[in-house]
Structures are given as C-alpha cells and as structure tokens.
Amino acid sequence: MASGPARERVTAPGEGDGVALASARGRWILTCAVLASGMAMLDGTVVNVALPTLGKDLDASISALQWVVNAYMLTLSALLLLGGALGDRIGRRRTLVIGVVWFAAASALCGLAQDAGMLIAARTLQGVGGALLTPGSLALVRSSFRTDDQARAVGAWSGLGGVAGAIGPFLGGWLIDGPGWRWIFLINVPLAALVLWAVRHVPESRDEEAARRPFDVTGACLAALFLAGISFALIGASGDTSTAATVLPGLLGLAAGAVFVVVEHRARYPMLPLELFRSRLFTAANVMTLCLYAAIGGILFMLPVQLQTTLGYDALQAGTATLPITVLMLLLSASAGDLARRLGPRLPLLVGPLVAAAGVLLMLRVRPGAAYVTEVLPAVVVLGLGMSLFVAPLTATVLASVDASRAGLASGVNNTAARIAQLLVVAGLPLAVGLSGTAYADPDALNTAFGKAAVGCAALFVLASAAAAVFVRPSPTAWHDERGNAPQCKTCLGVNAPPLEPGERG
C-alpha cells in the first residue's frame, strides 16, 4: 500500500497537480473507479445469497460451499497488501486494468463452471483479481484528482459505491431467481468492458520511491499457505476428511504462519511491517477488527441460508432482507465518525458492538413461521445500527494509532485483518455448530445450527466491546495528533471490510 504522497508522479501530460472533479475527464475517472469497486462489491454481496441454489444445482456439500466463499477470500486476503504495492510500483491505472481483465476472465470461468471443483478453482483466481481491484479503485481517485478536489472525489466515490452496494441484493437476487446463479458472475464481463472503456481517460500515476523497492513475494506466499492450511483443517474437520488429511494442513499452516513472522521481521521491505504492532492501540484495534468482522461474516454467511432453507424465501427476498444494514451504514456512518471525532472513539466502540450483539440475538426469533416485519426486520435494523456506530470509529482509531505517513498501510492491514476474520469464521463456524455434509438443506438441522451461530457471533461482538473498554482511552484528546486534529473516517462502502484508505488525519 502507498505510505504517503512522497515522490509520486502523475504521468499524464498537462494535468498540473491533477484533474478537476468537475471536468469531463474527472467524471470519467470517477465512473471508472466506481464501476471497478462495484464489480468486487457486487460479488461479495450476492454469493452468500446464492449458496442454497449453488448447493442444489451442483450437488455440493457444506464444505464445498464454504470453499466457494473462502477460495475467493483466501487469495484476496493474502494478496491485498501486495496488490496495493503493485499499483504504487508499476502504476495504478495499469494495475487496475490488469485487475479488471483478470477479474472478468475469472468471473466468466465461475459462470461456466460445471461442478463445485471448477467453481472453487475459478473463485481462487477471482480473488487474485479482487486483490488488484480493491485497493486500486480508491488509489486511482486519490492520485488522479487535484488536491482541492480529493475530499469531494472520495466522498462521491463513497456515496456512489454505497448506492451500488444497496442495489446489489436486488440485482443479485433477481439474477439468481431469473436467468440463474451463473449470471451473478457473468454480469462482471459487461461491467469490466465499461471500466476498460472509461479507463482511457484516466492518467497514470505511481510512487517513484516505492518503484525501487522489491516485492515481498516470500511473505505473500507464506501468508497464503498459512491461511490455506488453517482453512483446509477447519473445513475438513467438519466433513468426512480423515484426521491425517485434516491435521497435516493445519500444522503446515501454523508452521507457515510462524515462518511468515520471522521473514517479515527480517525483511528490509516487508509486506507487513511488524513494528506497526508496537502500538498498543493499533494492535487492540486490529484484535477488535478480527472479532467484529468474524461476527459479521459468520451471521451473514448463515442468515441467507436460514431464510431460504428454513423460512422458504426465494433468493431475491433473502438478498433484500438484509438491505437495511447497508442503507443504515450508508446514512449513519458519517454521523458516527463525527461523533467519535468530538467525543473520542471509546463510547461508539463500546456501545456499537453491544447493539450489534443485541441485533444478532434477536435473530434467534428467525425460525420457521417467523414474519419478516416482526422478526427479521427488527433484527437486521438493530444489527445495522450497531455496525453504523462502530465501523467509522474503528477505522479512524486505526489511523490514529500510527504516524500519518503510514495511514494507508495501516488501513490496508486493518482491511486485510477483517477479510481474514471472515475467511476463518466461514471455515470454522459450520464445524462449531455441528453442520456437515448436506445438513444445510435440512430445515430442522439448519435451524438448530443457526441458533448456535447467532449466540457465538453475539459473543464475538461482546468480546470486541470488552476490548474497547480495556484498551481504548476514554479521553478524546488522547486520540488527537500533535496539532490537535482527530482522524476522520466518513467512507463506508459495505459490510465486507472496513474502508480502505478512507481519509486523512487532520
């Protein structure tokens, strides 16, 4: 990830210090960035909704469906920081083009998959493209526009991206129920064509200082082996895999994780500078991130399946059932960020997770015969209110815990932590709640497992709140920099991860 604006070069001639947002070219750049981030966002929004249909059409077990989600999350999590660094070195426009083409090609393979194994392999490739798209779209906005227009450009990108996230459940559910689940992937192909059409108007930019640094390929490979090994162990343990086939990947994963720490400690230019974790606040904020996004990922993995299998919803109904969460986050996150700026982050980080925990516990009422208005809607509204309270303050706390020049890197690490949390919870939750084989298609078995999952996810929210009580200082001034400024975060694009490089300190 870019660590600062030093020695950054915009290679398009005649643009001065950047492009004006109000110009025709500025609108093209914004359109390109929104469409690119929208591709990855749409994928993250609708795949969980499609799981029951995928299981039925591909005759897939719960472990196969776990891998449909986690194959993408595995490569995305392992390569996200490397993807941001690649844009700094070879050019953000070029990296975005590579990511768009890669993501579209992998999406086409997903749409053409004939069995679960082919789909999982294609999803693995799709995650590589996502690792280039996710940091690339916002980096393009922040490097292309004039300094005076950057805040408005990021705000416009955020707002339009939020609208795209809100549309996703409608579009995804309609595609699954209408043309079929394959189109939740195939739709990325025409979207990619639009991005490539718009990208012609985007100037190239890169960080000249970063371009001279080598890539930490060893670190990226070890991170991928660690996550893959743990995922294989957890998913295999809930299936019919032998003990040896389960234990061995787990041990290899743990070994890769230990070597990763040693390599990153010794590397001159590490992918993950471990000195960041010398900050007690940074470490605590990322532990909270692991708890919060594991809880979010777990409940949003199970809820669409519960709604479709146990309550008889179709895909469109299941997709739109959680829409209030996205709408509330879009409407309220900026206000929560302002509240945290005035009062300090401790109160929203204490209260927000507890409110979210209450929302998840209300989902214990989402069982056969439950009505949407009286049982499902109150639960998702309370969950959305809780998430709206803590997402922006959590990210701003991460920014406050490091030097301003490393805010981009810190944000990338925090975003990666959230995705790793969701990767691990999807791998381990079915095992924890006793869901294996094709039991997800049995309403009674699924209803029992869903109740256990709701309690477990609520406990993770409470744990995050307790961490805030212990590690986040109550005084707002302790959160300010040497000039008395508090970090701000008003960017919220969805529920998959915290905002990536969301704003500036000061």
Image: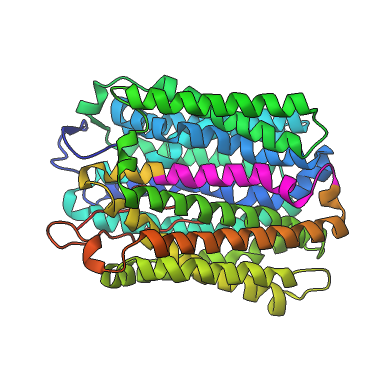
Quadrant of the rendered image containing residue 203 = top left
| In this view, 160 is above or below 385 | above
What residue occupies the far bottom of the structure in this picture?
374
**243 to the left or right of 346:** right
State whether the magenta stretch is mostly helix, strand or loop. helix
Residue at x-position 47% and y-position 23%: 259
Quadrant where the image shows the C terminus: bottom left
The residue lying at 57 percent from left, 39 percent from top is 73
Q: Residue furthest front?
A: 470
Q: Which image quadrant: the N terminus?
A: top left
Residue at the spot x=51%, y=30% of the render? 128
Task: Identify which residue is drawn at 45% across, 50% down.
Answer: 287
Residue 413's spot in the image, x, y percent? 39, 41
Q: How far from the left and from the top, in percent, is residue 226?
A: 55, 29
| Residue 109 seen from this side | no
Residue 165 lies in the magenta stretch: no
Examine the rendering and report whether any part of residue 363 can be seen.
yes
Compared with 356, 223 (above or below) is: above
Near-viewer residue (75 or 189): 75
Please give left or right for residue 239 compared with residue 69 in the image: right
Choose top left, top right, bottom left or bottom right for residue 469: bottom left
Residue bounds of the magenta highlight: 414-438
In the image, is 41 to the left or to the right of 118? left
